[in-house]
Image (tube, coloured by chain):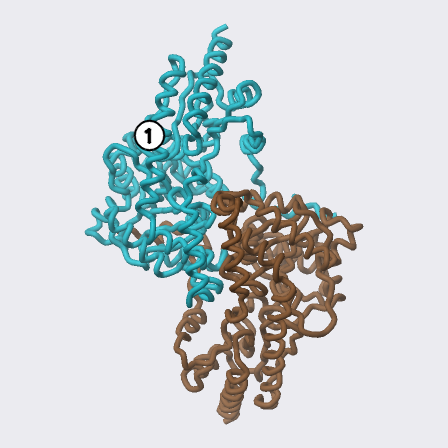
Chain colours: A brown, B cyan
Amino acid sequence: MMDWEKVFATRASRMKASEIRELLKLLEQPDIISFAGGIPDAALFPKDAVSQAYAKVLGGEQATVGLQYSVSEGYKPLREWIVGQMAALGIPCKAENVLITSGSQQVLDYLGKIFLSPKDTALVTWPTYMGALGAFNAYEPTYDRLTPMSNRAAASYREDAEKAGGRVKFAYCVPEFSNPTGETMPQQDRERLLDLADELDIAVIEDAAYQSLRYDGESVPPILALDIARNGGDIDKTRTLYCGSFSKTLAPGLRVGWVVAAESVIRKLVLVKQAADLHSSTINQMVIGEVAAEVFAPQVEKVKATYSARRDRMLAALDKSMPEGVEWSKPEGGMFVWVTLPKGMDGAELLARAIADYRIAFVPGRAFHADGSGENTLRLSFSCASFEMIDEGMSRLGDLVRREMVKSAA
Amino acid sequence: MMDWEKVFATRASRMKASEIRELLKLLEQPDIISFAGGIPDAALFPKDAVSQAYAKVLGGEQATVGLQYSVSEGYKPLREWIVGQMAALGIPCKAENVLITSGSQQVLDYLGKIFLSPKDTALVTWPTYMGALGAFNAYEPTYDRLTPMSNRAAASYREDAEKAGGRVKFAYCVPEFSNPTGETMPQQDRERLLDLADELDIAVIEDAAYQSLRYDGESVPPILALDIARNGGDIDKTRTLYCGSFSKTLAPGLRVGWVVAAESVIRKLVLVKQAADLHSSTINQMVIGEVAAEVFAPQVEKVKATYSARRDRMLAALDKSMPEGVEWSKPEGGMFVWVTLPKGMDGAELLARAIADYRIAFVPGRAFHADGSGENTLRLSFSCASFEMIDEGMSRLGDLVRREMVKSAA
């Protein structure tokens, strides 16, 4: 009989399903009101446009192209469409600066693969996107806290990385309507982040999964746009990798994302992708290209109208239902509100009680912290919740938090 | 300006495009007769069945399921269809033993990720599938030569691995109609391989990409079937991972493959997949499931009829055109014939002359050898070649080889 543990060798093979994920798996009971899943509302998917695009591609001369192997860098017309979108964001680039991936999650895996040796340091915010930590963890890095707004010196980061046994390799962030906090990084902090990256001579990974979903407030230039401006308009001299996704605007089930960066790093990533899965689904890239060309702008407007109303409703419900001592973010876009509970309260314990006694769910904040802190925080997602669910759910959450506050005071 | 080389840290980031791949990229001129690409004939794709399946999925109640995020292990009905296919091959298993991946290439990447620390040893045949070497290379292994037919002792493999600075972690092979040789591993060798794996306590990776494509001869039980038989019928006690693919039977453009193994290793791979790309395209898994249920058996018969006739034609043309001193494999299935030239002749040099003077192409054999040997070998693919291309191409190849033999004799 095979003893697999003897053969497993790497951190990836030692990964365990987190208890929180296991707990959240239990949430499929229909009577639970869930604010846990960070997923788009399926009712908004452009189903007809997608259906028509598959029929068009498979009914035309390009059908066999869609079903055949293709190049690792991705379908050229889709890459060219992305070039147009990037230009509108202040990111002038060519198709050679774009790689198509199977969702933007895959970019994070590949970036871990090319940058991280064991004990190298990755800079991330506390909290940060849980899936980024999962992708990077396989490559056994150390994490240090990215705080662009602080004046912590580059030398201090460098020294700590050396103590950990490696070098600082990149800074990762979700600058717009962050997962999990919903907050947006101001332009001044983006500039400071680039200053720090220059001093450390490291890459900056800009996870722009939510960028299109701004509901109000002033838009801020992408970090890559600021980096290009610092480099005389030449993307090939920049250090920022911009990761984009169609999952939050069109549909995640086709698994199509992209990364935009200097051509020299894209060329490396193409080789990594070739070795790792040859290429992303040809037909899905063609279909996303068709759908984007046909309905991208109105589709984004539709999603924004729905989600912004739900955000408004959630913020109003929180105002009404939460006791004194609880704070939350006021996101200008995206899918999440971040709640900070009074000190001493534990999000994971609260979740267990929320499910057992109040039939509501959310994600405890600790899962988003590379250092395991953030006990007294939690993430609420409003993307899939009706007004009724939001009103009822926030009312129950308020009751639960009040009950726990009374208990801990006793 | 960013100096990327300073930030790159890993073997994956140091990978370079091979010169041969660059050379083969030049082959898009229409007047070249190419036997280089190891790809299926697009004319055989079940285009109508695929088109109907997308229309059915997107027109029905399951449309939003297909467009939404889904579980990392894969679409349950497709996993259950695979369970049925495996049973017919003598591999009794449950859906929990099956993970869906984005082509079987992705399994190789994930297996490198969970098994290989730098300097660990992977056992592969000389020659072996080039893409497997590419996938494993990112994890910085050493290679040792797998020769199941030899009596080399386990202790010798173990000692060499220790000298290299690690441990033997797995043996990888393509037992049926191998890429690149077209040869099939006899049952006796499969049993010896399992003996060796038992002694070394390592995993066996069975790459079964071509398994369905047998044209004649006796079928041999899959290594996993033999392993299950050794373990009282219990797949959860086995050490073999069976990697399957729809790319050679249905269509590669949807990127759907699978791996079957003991549940404990599948559970690890599910975590790896979750961190690396969340899951394979939901809609493509549903569509492949529909198409497989509808047309798999007749589709495989159609592909076999076409490819077996091309194989026959190529073997006959080689008989007619090749000079004394050249040998080649007689594959019972698959897509490839492996040619051994007289010693001293170099496949890569021959390719350059073949393109320049004879307008034909193939893949030089060295690319498939982990130790860089195999100079005097080359791979011919017959899957996409018409009878006319085969007759004309083999005639030109014979002329070229004769010319080179005369030159080297002079």
Q: Using the rendered image of the protein, determine whether residue A136 is visible from the camera's viewpoint.
A: no
Establish if B205 lies above or below A387: above
* Residue at the extreme top of the image, as rendered: B410
Q: Would you place residue B28 above or below residue B391 in this image?
A: below
In the image, what residue occupies the spot 58% across and 37% down?
A: B16
Q: Secondary structure at mark 1?
A: loop
Closest to the observer, B140 or B81: B81
Residue A174 place in picture, x, y as percent? 63, 64
Find residue B56 and report its horizontal and vertical position in percent. 42, 60
Q: Residue at x 35, y 42 (%)?
A: B208
**Chain of the residue where label 1 is placed in the rendered structure:** B
In the drawing, does residue A329 fall left or right of residue A105?
right
- The image shows residue B361, relative to residue A68, as above or below, that is above
Mark 1: which amino acid?
A: Pro
Q: Which residue is mark 1?
A: B331
Q: Residues within 10 Å of mark 1 (few under 14, many from 20)?
A: many
Judging depth in this view, the residue of A31 and A110 nearest the camera is: A31
Q: Is residue B158 left or right of residue A249?
A: left
Q: Residue at x 25, y 37 (%)?
A: B219
Furthest toward the right, the residue is A232
